[in-house]
Amino acid sequence: MQIKITDFDFSDKKLFQKALQIRTIVFVQEQKVPKNLEYDGLDGQAKHFLLFFNDKPIATSRYRITNEGYKLERFAVLKEYRGKHFGKKLLEYILNYVPDKTNVYFNSQVSAVDFYERNGFVTVGQVFYEADIKHYKMVWQEKKIL
């Protein structure tokens, strides 16, 4: 079992296409997120990540620097690989990669809140909707995984 995580910029079209394929399967096909919301035009501002398992890309994410800090986005793991700790490995890698961990946050789907809470995040505020899916804002509380 070989796991490799690669970070890259939008300019690496080959890796970006692999990440986009995963995002399309997970968000557009499975969760019915409209394409115009998933492909938000912000990929050029982001640092991207791909997790490979036995040389197959199976998970992806990105982060952007915003006025609030480092916003983690587009966490997606292919369905057949969920529940096998690949998401945790990708999250750990990204948190180790982010240079300033004082302001790391993201919007989590309600269904994933437990996963992120187990990995050092806490919810902030009330539930809200993005793409007709319930979300919570979550912030990292530098305590569990690093």
Image (cartoon, rainbow, N blue to C red):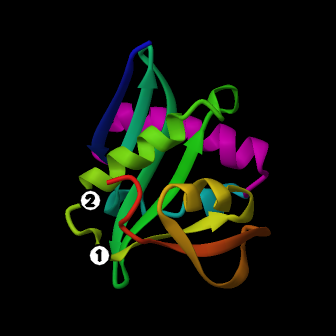
**In this view, 67 is above or below 132:** below
Q: Are marks 1 and 2 in contact (CB under 8 Å)?
A: no
Q: Is residue 129 left or right of residue 19?
A: right
Residue at x 38% of width, y 47% of height: 92
> In the rendered structure, does residue 141 fall within the stretch colored magenta?
no
- Rounded to the nearest angstrom, the CA distance separating label 1 from label 2 is 10 Å
| Residue 75 location (% of width, % of height) | 54, 50
**Callout 2 environment at 10 Å: few (<14), some (14 to 19), or many (20+)?**
some
> In the rendered structure, does residue 20 fall within the stretch colored magenta?
yes
| Residue 5 location (% of width, % of height) | 34, 33
Which residues fall within the magenta stretch? 10-33
Quadrant in which residue 142 is drawn:
bottom left
Residue at x 47% of width, y 38% of height: 19
Question: Which residue in the structure is indicated by mark 2?
Answer: 98
Q: Which mark is residue 102?
A: 1
Please identify the dominant SS of the magenta region.
helix
Mark 1 vs mark 2: give the one in front.
Answer: 1
Quarter of the image containing the C terminus?
Answer: bottom left
**In this view, 14 is above or below 104:** above
- In depth, the one of 50 and 25 nearer the eye is 50
Residue at x 68% of width, y 49% of height: 27
| Residue 12 location (% of width, % of height) | 29, 39
**Callout 1 environment at 10 Å: few (<14), some (14 to 19), or many (20+)?**
few
Residue at x 52% of width, y 41% of height: 87
Say which element carries label 2: loop
